[in-house]
Amino acid sequence: MANKRLSVRRLLVLIIVIWFSIIPPIICSCSKDISTDDIDDESIWLQELTSPELNGRKTGTEGAKKTAEFIFSELLRMGHSPFIEDFAYKDSIIMRNIIVDIPGKNDSIIIIGAHYDGAVNSPIYQAANDNASGIISLLSIAKIIQPSQNSIMLCFWDGEENTTGTAFNGSSYFLQHFKFGGKIKCYCNIDCCGRNGDSIYLYYSPDMEHKFGNVDLTSSSLNVIKKVSESNSSDYVPFKNNGIPFWGWNDYDVLRYIHTPSDSPEFISISKVKAVSNLTIQILNNL
């Protein structure tokens, strides 16, 4: 059954390739939480994003392009109207951000982002936790997100990995060419959220610490470890450098396996990834 659904998705991807253009945003009307028992979509996403056909999803490769097309098609299937922000790095490497805009009732914007590129161009480097897990979590959020007081933007970044001489390329370009009305209220980053048991870091800038007081972080199966961010290691960095409050999710002890063949899908907990999505929605509802 899963293979049949994958075939349908791949057929849709081929159709999307000829319709890779900007179309007006619409609002997703989904309203239920993600069930931890209903893992069909998330399991298929993990299988697709770590497949040998994507060859590690390294920026500038055919695998990265196919990944962008797959994400785009899945967002369309949910009822969203994603658009592509493409740009050239040093006039040669084409990068593609995929963005969903969900208008709110005021002009404050909350951005949630996850990078989809991998660090190595090889089918044995599947980049499962770094960062297929984050993409799956963000797609899961896209399934249930509702319009709120704040406008929400879901951003799937290209070029986070330092494979071209610089890192955080997609998020940096987005901020440098920000063309949307309103003010960015804060940014949420999801990077490596599906491995190493039930514990996960919730990191944040100092000005966000008081924002989590009304959120029951014990409502899921996760052991959430709160900490003020002291590093510069993912797509929150451009937002931090621009004085924008940020927060995000990250597994502990990731450096021992990311960018190696050991970052493989059999170690990913789909239920953990979905729990991160549900907690993210809870936090959004309190901002």
Image (cartoon, rainbow, N blue to C red):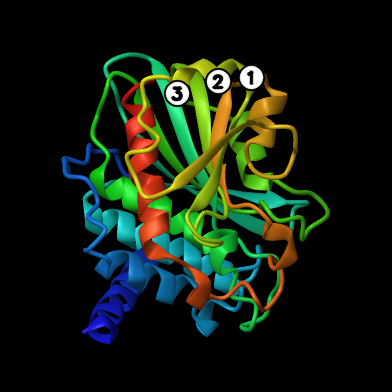
Circle 1 crowding by C-alpha within 10 Å: few under 14, some 14–19, many from 20:
some
Q: Secondary structure at mark 1?
A: helix
User: Which residue is pictured at 29% across the width and 71% down the height?
Assistant: 12
Residue 153, percent from left and from top: 41, 35
Q: Which residue is mark 2?
A: 209
Q: CA distance from mark 1 to mark 2?
A: 6 Å
Q: Position of residue 134 (x, y in %)?
A: 49, 54
Residue for badge 1: 206
Q: Give the side of residue 238 with respect to residue 191, left or right.
A: right
Depicted 139 relative to depicted 105: above or below: below
Label 3: how many residues lie within 10 Å, few (<14), some (14-19) or many (20+)? some
Residue sitting at 49 percent across and 70 percent down? 66
Q: Which mark is residue 212?
A: 3
| In this view, 102 is above or below 196 | above
- Whole-angstrom CA distance, mark 1 to mark 3, is 12 Å
Q: Amino acid at mark 3?
A: Phe
Contact check, label 1 and label 2, Cβ < 8 Å: yes
Instruction: Give the left or right position of residue 136, taking residue 158 as reference.
Output: left
Label 3 near label 2: C-beta < 8 Å? yes
Mark 1 is on which residue type? Pro
Q: Residue at x 57, y 67 (%)?
A: 64
